[in-house]
Image: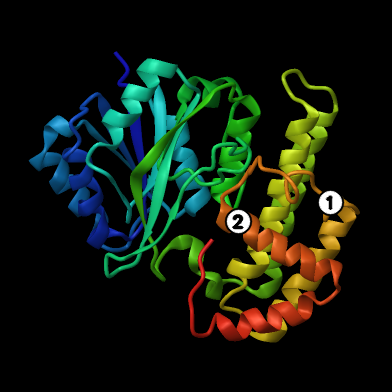
């Protein structure tokens, strides 16, 4: 009989972290789960650490898939999607951990609501154990805009029926938007269930390994993905409305500004200007009216977190005044003394 949860862990060279992740799973009071670990041909002793854990705790129902070659983050997470057997899938990073009551809280919500996706609050933690921020969904949170897989589960049958997979970087966005296309019901747990470790070794933060052009192209692809999803809805697909279109336009705007503010944060000033110029051109080509959105101003129905909405509103004002370059310069100076995260 299939377990309720597959806890999928994407592992690559995180031997020093993964035991903490597994210890947190072992502490769960809810035990109807499997742990599926996909190791992307680690060059450290990750596999040895995992296999020892499997021997020490056979009751945890751990499956290990070892890749014969390094395939990259996207394919490593797709391996989890393809091989999970639980009724719901939670994708985790090997350096994060869940709260001790995470699975029991999610199981209670599933029994009560029978949702397609369950989303809990996520705390960003630095390596000193301090909370940087907590991502809390607002009451009117759009299903399109919770673009992290951390601290959430999705009904596996949806993944199978629609052949959902991750198409590229940024992996969370492709995965969560594809899920949202087919989710009819989402439930929220309004307390922290997942701890997301923020450190320089995280795969998603290694911009130094890519040229500015590659980073720009990655985010252009994401913007095109949103536009294609909007067009999919506008073709008259069942169960979609104009509200979905407007919410997707808002989330596309969020991805545009967050790329400029956060992804480009560690670039040199001239590289930030180049990044902005290229991304701005792309946004205009996709939507000439992207600065207008009914959920951005003059509404009490907050579709995104206050932090995200505030950042978007400031950037919209700067662009309308045609002083975005000045804003980027000021942000460049401030971010040298204070780290910002999305």
Task: Tell me: residue 331, above or below residue 89.
Answer: below
Residue 239 in the image: x percent, y percent? 72, 19
Residue 282 in the image: x percent, y percent? 83, 60
| Direction from residue 63 to residue 210 in the image, left or right | right
Closest to the observer, 224 or 198: 198
Q: Quadrant location of residue 273?
A: bottom right
Q: Considering only order in the chain, which callout, 1 or 2, is on the residue closer to the N terminus?
A: 1
Q: Which residue is pictured at 40% across the width and 49% down the height?
A: 122
| Direction from residue 338 to residue 329 in the image, left or right | right
Per the image, label 1 sits on a secondary structure element best described as: loop
| Direction from residue 120 to residue 328 in the image, left or right | right
Q: Residues within 10 Å of mark 1 (few under 14, many from 20)?
A: some
Closest to the observer, 264 or 107: 107
Per the image, label 2 sits on a secondary structure element best described as: helix
**Alpha-carbon distance for marks 2 and 1?**
16 Å
- In the rendered image, the quadrant that contains the C terminus is bottom right
| Direction from residue 227 to residue 137 in the image, left or right | left
Q: Which residue is pictured at 69% across the width and 84% down the height?
A: 329
Q: Which residue is pictured at 72% across the width and 50% down the height?
A: 252
Residue 276 in the image: x percent, y percent? 75, 71
Mark carried by residue 292: 1
Q: Residues within 10 Å of mark 2 (few under 14, many from 20)?
A: some
Residue 179 in the image: x percent, y percent? 58, 32
Q: Residue furthest top?
A: 1
Q: Which residue is pictured at 72% across the width and 44% down the height?
A: 299
Q: Which residue is mark 2?
A: 308
Closest to the observer, 165 or 342: 342
Residue 278, visible in the rendered structure: no
Task: Tell me: residue 162, above or below residue 276.
Answer: above
Q: Quadrant location of residue 317?
A: bottom right
Closest to the observer, 54 or 152: 152
């Amino acid at each position: 009989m299939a377990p309720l949860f597959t806890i999928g862990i994407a592992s690559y060279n995180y031997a020093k972290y993964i035991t903490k992740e597994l210890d947190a799973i072992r502490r769960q009071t809810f035990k109807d789960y499997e742990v599926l670990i996909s190791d992307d041909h680690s060059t450290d002793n990750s596999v040895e650490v995992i296999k020892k854990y499997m021997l020490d705790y056979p009751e945890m129902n751990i499956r290990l898939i070892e890749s014969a070659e390094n395939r990259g983050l996207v394919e490593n997470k797709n391996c989890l999607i393809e091989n999970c057997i639980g009724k719901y899938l939670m994708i985790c990073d090997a350096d994060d951990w869940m709260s001790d009551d995470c699975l029991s809280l999610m199981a209670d919500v599933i029994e009560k609501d029978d949702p397609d996706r369950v989303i809990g609050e996520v705390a960003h933690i630095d390596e000193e154990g301090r909370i940087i921020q907590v991502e809390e969904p607002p009451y009117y949170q759009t299903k399109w805009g919770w673009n992290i897989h951390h601290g959430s589960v999705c009904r596996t049958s949806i993944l199978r029926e629609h052949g959902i997979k991750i198409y590229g970087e940024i992996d969370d966005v492709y995965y969560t938007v594809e899920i949202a296309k087919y989710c009819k019901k989402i439930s929220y747990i309004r307390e922290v269930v997942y701890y997301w470790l923020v450190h320089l070794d995280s795969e998603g933060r290694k911009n130094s390994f890519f040229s500015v052009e590659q980073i720009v192209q990655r985010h252009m692809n994401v913007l095109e993905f949103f536009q294609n999803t909007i067009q999919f809805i506008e073709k008259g697909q069942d169960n979609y409305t104009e509200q979905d279109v407007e919410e997707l336009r808002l989330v596309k705007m969020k991805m545009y500004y967050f790329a400029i503010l956060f992804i480009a944060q560690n670039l040199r000033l001239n590289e930030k200007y180049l990044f902005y110029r290229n991304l701005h051109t792309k946004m205009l080509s996709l939507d000439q009216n992207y600065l207008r959105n009914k959920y951005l101003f003059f509404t009490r129905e907050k579709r995104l977190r206050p932090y995200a909405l505030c950042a978007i509103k400031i950037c919209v004002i700067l662009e309308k005044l045609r002083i975005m370059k000045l804003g980027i310069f000021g942000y460049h100076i401030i971010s040298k003394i204070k780290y910002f995260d999305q």
